[in-house]
Image (cartoon, helix red, strand yellow):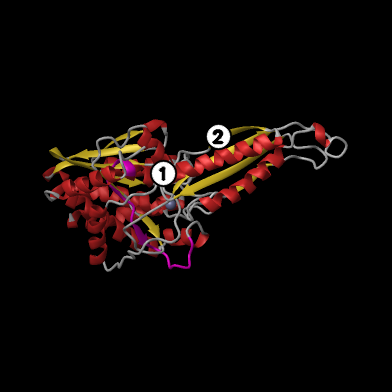
């Protein structure tokens, strides 16, 4: 394994830099996914592309001896408009491919199978959420990935999240001469905002329901007959999120009924589930980081976003650790972070992450009992949350 990692190191770094040089938006990651797939094919993997109906998704696999665990490294490779790889997904893609290739070189002497799964569109629709629903992760025993960050952290949590759009339909009329003949769709939308403000008082503190007005009428002297608002609802877990969504729907209903406007609610993405970190896997990853001189922060996160890895983690044991490539003052999704992701600090983080991923994977595949402990922990969590994934 040491030899494999050493001899792959420069081609892994070259892969990351190539991805960084040509950033592609969510669902348009054609050359990025091709590049990673080509790298893996050259390492003896068989590749299936366009899985789950997503053109830029792929599953690459390499088998060892019969039986044994199935282990997957997850690659992301989408970038952001104008600021390129400002979330460092070039490093995620290269680390997953690199760790997969390193395991691939030794899997002939092990029982089991190693997969690298290309998961597009993390920044928009949440490719993994869709791929989970379409069965891509069926039969896999553990899913491992890393994300570049400003800190080293192995116990990841994230918020459950769902984005919704509401359209109110009213009736236009002269807003000065005969407003009473119109039905004001903008009024309904503004009421929705106010009702949500009120609803926050009886929802858990961490709940967030920010919204924007996308359409609110065209001219002040016409009663708006159409308004559109977009909201993203966030909560600690899926069951709280369901409550929040219920509150949202009743706010819309109340606003619609008060004004006489009709309404349509549309889902803008797949709901993201909260991330459940498999601690057995996280501990192994943490030990590898410690060996490489990286101290981790283990206190709970204060500021969280949402991850499509959350949906994977509800189905199979998963980790989504963070490895620092930037100082704390540099925010993700900034130009500075993009620069670091393509530079020396990014490469240093990439080496650390690839190695920790590969060695964690190796332990799952080669040490008797590790995979069973990973599974046991997961089953125990499932029982605690009554029935597990919804
Ligand atoms: Zn990201």
Q: Is residue 273 visible?
A: yes
Distance from the alpha carbon under mark 1 to that under mark 2: 18 Å
Q: Is residue 299 left or right of residue 21?
A: left
User: Is residue 170 positioned above or below 86 on the image?
Assistant: above
Where does label 1 land, which residue?
A: 238
Q: Which mark is residue 266?
A: 2
Along the viewing direction, whichever of 229 and 178 lies nearer the viewer: 178
Task: Report the span colored magenta.
Answer: 314-331
User: Is residue 69 positioned above or below 298 on the image?
Assistant: above
Q: Is mark 1 within 8 Å of ligand 1?
A: no
Q: Classify residue 359 by image quadrant.
A: bottom left
Picture coordinates of residue 214 (x, y %)? 65, 43
Q: Which mark is residue 105?
A: none
Position of the C terminus by quadrant: top left
Which-is-in-front pick, marks 1 and 2?
Answer: 1
Please tell me which residue is depicted at 16% across the width and 46% down the height of the picture.
Answer: 372
Along the viewing direction, whichever of 340 and 367 lies nearer the viewer: 367
For label 2, the SS is strand
N-terminal of the pair, mark 1 or mark 2, is 1
Please tell me which residue is depicted at 30% across the width and 41% down the height of the picture.
Answer: 386
Extreme right residue here? Answer: 177
Q: Is residue 21 left or right of residue 102?
A: right
């Amino acid at each position: 394994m040491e030899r494999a990692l050493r001899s792959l190191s420069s081609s892994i770094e070259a892969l990351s830099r190539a991805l960084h040089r040509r950033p592609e938006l969510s669902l348009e990651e054609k050359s990025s996914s091709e590049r990673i797939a080509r790298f893996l094919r050259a390492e003896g993997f068989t590749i299936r592309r366009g899985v789950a109906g997503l053109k830029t998704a792929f599953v690459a696999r390499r088998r060892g001896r019969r039986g044994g665990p199935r282990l997957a490294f997850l690659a992301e490779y989408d970038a952001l408009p104008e600021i390129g790889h400002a979330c460092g997904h070039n490093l995620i893609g290269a680390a997953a491919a690199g760790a997969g290739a390193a395991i691939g070189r030794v899997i002939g002497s092990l029982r089991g199978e190693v997969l690298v799964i290309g998961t597009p569109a993390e920044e928009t629709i949440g490719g993994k959420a869709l791929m989970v629903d379409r069965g891509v992760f069926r039969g896999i025993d553990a899913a491992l990935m890393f994300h570049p960050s400003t800190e080293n952290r192995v116990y990841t949590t994230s918020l459950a999240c769902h984005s919704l759009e509401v359209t109110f339909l009213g009736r236009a009329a002269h807003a000065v001469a005969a407003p009473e003949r119109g039905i004001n769709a903008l009024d309904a939308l503004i009421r929705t905002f106010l009702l949500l403000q009120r609803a926050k008082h009886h929802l858990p503190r961490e709940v967030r329901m920010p919204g924007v007005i996308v359409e609110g009428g065209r001219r002040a002297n016409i009663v708006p007959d159409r308004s559109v608002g977009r909201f993203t609802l966030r909560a600690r877990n899926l069951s709280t999120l369901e409550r929040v969504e219920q509150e949202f729907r009743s706010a819309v209903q109340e606003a619609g009924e008060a004004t006489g406007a009709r309404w349509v609610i549309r889902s803008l993405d797949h709901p993201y589930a909260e991330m459940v970190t498999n601690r057995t896997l996280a501990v192994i990853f943490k030990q590898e980081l410690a060996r490489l001189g990286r101290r981790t922060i283990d206190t709970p996160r204060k500021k969280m976003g949402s991850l499509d890895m959350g949906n994977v983690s509800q189905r199979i044991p998963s980790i989504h650790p963070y490895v620092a490539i930037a100082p704390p003052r540099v925010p993700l999704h900034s130009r500075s972070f993009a620069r670091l992701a393509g530079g020396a600090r990014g490469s240093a983080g990439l080496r650390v992450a690839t190695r920790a991923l590969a060695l964690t994977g190796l332990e799952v595949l080669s040490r008797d009992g590790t995979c069973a402990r990973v599974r046991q922990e997961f089953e125990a969590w499932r029982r605690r949350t009554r029935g597990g994934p919804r």
